[in-house]
Image (cartoon, helix red, strand yellow):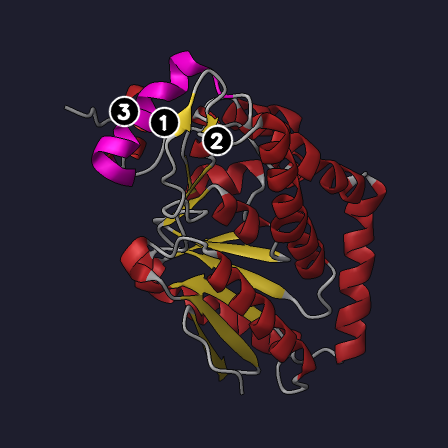
Amino acid sequence: MVSYSNILYEKKRRGVQITLNRPQVLNALSEELLNELDSALDEAKKDPEIRAIVLTGAGGVFSTGEDISGDDRPTAWPYGIPEGSSLVYEYDKMRDQDRKSFLERQLYRWEYPKPIIGAVSGWCLGAASWLALTCHLTYAADDAVFGQPQIRHASGTDFIWVMLAGFKNALRYSLTGDHIDAQEALRIGLVNQIVPKDKLLDECFAFVERVALVPPETVKINLHISRMGLEMMGLRKAWLLNAELSAMARLTKEEEFNRKMEDARQSGGLKAFFETRDAPFYPEPFGPRAGKKIK
């Protein structure tokens, strides 16, 4: 079996539990973690004893999204790109990165021959929300909070939100980056079921055991048939555009809104960056920050 540093891999109850395991940074999605997740899914796909995958996060949190801690280069204005770089270079870099980290990985999980069940508790933000929602099924703990707060400074969203929640619901949250609690996520169709946090994994593996009663090839074909319904609605074509649109969106930083956040990052790190970005939006409509003001 492959050895992992950023995830945990545990076979049980006819399936495998893959745990994002960087609790010290709230399971932020580094490239190393994503590469290990790719390898773990490859390993599980080849193992006939594993009938389904449960994907979750360590420390009571699914993930706070992309790990942006390594990008501390000084920012040049008015375009908000690193000093010494160019718009063309940054666009090509972001587009090519998104093609690998987003498109290729999304399509791989989407076409995976065994059910992948997202077990979400706590924070599930940004790129982590895309990861959880492109699982074939998504179970939410009663404390789960979804959101795309990155759109408050750099835009970028995933078409899967529109497919699952519908145009108006997806647009309502993609315009503000507001948080969504488990009840709201269920109401708009982002998750299948809400489960008490202490029963989340047990509920997911109870479903795995039911799946295991169905022949593997039947499960594979049924996954394919259901998936084709969304593909006929254009999901694959939309994803093909995502790398181009995401790169454009992330380079449309307006100095008036973004410079103070970048200055906060340089002086106070990521915590100061996020506080500067999110404070004007408090209180959030849902989740643990609803009804609370930052002082």
Q: Quadrant of the C terminus?
A: top left
Q: Which residue is mark 2?
A: 84
At label 3, the amino acid type is Ala
All told, the count of numbered labels is 3
Residue at x 38% of width, y 66% of height: 21
Q: Secondary structure at mark 1?
A: loop
Q: Could you tell me how far apart the alpha carbons at marks 3 and 1 are, in whole angstroms?
A: 13 Å
Q: Secondary structure at mark 2?
A: loop
Q: Which of disc 1 and disc 2 is earlier in sequence?
A: 2
Q: Could you tell me how far apart the alpha carbons at marks 3 and 2 are, in whole angstroms?
A: 31 Å
| The image quarter in which residue 217 lies | bottom right
What secondary structure is the magenta-colored segment mainly?
helix
Left or right side of 210 for 27: left
From the image, state whether disc 2 or disc 1 is nearer to you: 2
At label 2, the amino acid type is Gly
Residue at x 38% of width, y 57% of height: 27
- Pick the front one: 113 or 191: 113
Q: Which of disc 1 and disc 3 is earlier in sequence?
A: 3
Residue 10 vertical position relative to residue 26 in the rendered view, above or below: below
Q: Farthest residue toward the right?
A: 232
Q: Farthest residue toward the front?
A: 84
Q: Which residue is mark 1?
A: 285
Magenta residues?
253-271
Q: Quadrant of the N terminus?
A: bottom right
- Mark 1 nearby-residue class (10 Å; few <14, some 14–19, many ≥20): some
- Mark 3 nearby-residue class (10 Å; few <14, some 14–19, many ≥20): few
Q: Is residue 260 magenta?
A: yes
Q: Which of disc 2 and disc 3 is earlier in sequence?
A: 2
Q: Position of residue 156 (x, y in %)?
A: 56, 32
Q: Which residue is mark 3?
A: 279
